[in-house]
Structure formats: structure tokens, C-alpha cells
Image (tube, rainbow, N blue to C red):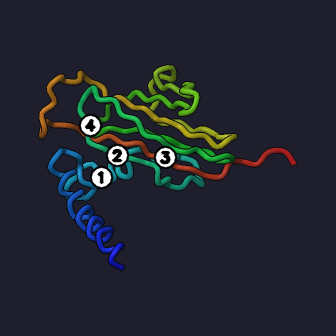
Amino acid sequence: MKKLLPFYLMFAIGFVAVPGITQRYGNVPKTAAGNPCLDFHKKACPPSPDDGFAYNGQSRSGLFYKGQTSTIKVVFYKGMDYHISVCSEDNSQVPFVIKDSKTNEVLYDNSTDNNTQEIQISNENTRHIIIQLTIPGELKKDIVKGQEGLCAGILIEHRRGDKTGF
């Protein structure tokens, strides 16, 4: 028991200290009060018009500056269809690219598809994917905390793919 006491003490100190550190050094706390863009993707990104798609927990929203590029890593599973829609608070056309994270192969680039803001894809093999989006506008070199930003989100939905063959 004496050997476990220092472990529990360090765990308790770390549990209390980490939230304070992230708030002080600018990471957005993951609370509704601290993140004005929480669940933006659920409210603003268009869901699939097709039946059977369900919300995927890998969907994300965030506060962005104009010109900022961001990536998220997701897993697309074998035999699933995915609907991906991207949206921003100012309703601008958000460029996004979907890449295979292992090979860095570009699987989709909406700039070659009339900057469409949503896509449906079928997945034959489980893959680790990177979705990279860039908020339109010019990125200012000296970003000041509290500078006005805008909400953007990626809504990911999934359903079982149609079975083909016997």
C-alpha cells in the first residue's frame, strides 16, 4: 500500500493540474461554455439526403482563422458507405482533401469536383484516412488570442454498404 501512495498522489495532482494548464496556454477547453463551435457540424453541415445514414462519432467542429488548414484522422471500415459534408459559419466553399494516411495517396480533392461540400464514398477495405480542410481567406501572420474566428465542421455519416454478388 505504501508503494501505491506516491502513484495515487501523482495521479491526483496531474488530474487537477492538466485542465488548468490547457486553459492557460490556449487550448480550447472541450466544454460548451469554452468552445463556441461545439457541435457546429451537427447544426450546420447538411446530412445525407439518402436513407440509412447514421451520425458518425468521428465528426468534428472547431474554431478557425481564415486561411488556417487543419486535419483530422479517421478510420473508414470495410463494407461501409460514408457521407462527408463540410461547412463553415460564413457559408464559404471550404476546400478539402481526403488522403490515405499510410500512403499519403490523395483519394479525393473537392477542388477537382466543382468545390462540392459533400461526398458519398464506399469503402472496400478498412483504411486510416486524413481529411484536410482549409478555411478560405488569408492567414494573418500574427494571430492574436481573441482574434475573431469562425466555426467550421466536418459531418461524417455511415451505413452498411450494399452487398453485391452471392
User: Disc 3 designates what residue?
Assistant: 156
Contact (Cβ within 8 Å) of mark 1 with mark 2: yes
Mark earlier in primary sequence (3, 4): 4
The relative height of residue 26 versus residue 143 in the rendered view (above or below) is below
> Depth check: 24 or 123 in front?
24
Residue 165 shown left or right of residue 126 in the figure: right
Kind of residue at badge 1: Leu
User: Disc 1 designates what residue?
Assistant: 38
Mark 2: secondary structure: strand
User: Disc 4 designates what residue?
Assistant: 64
Residue 60 shown left or right of residue 26 in the figure: right
Mark 1: secondary structure: loop
Q: Residue furthest right?
A: 166
Q: Residue furthest bottom?
A: 1
User: Disc 2 designates what residue?
Assistant: 61
Q: Residue at x 56, y 52 (%)?
A: 53
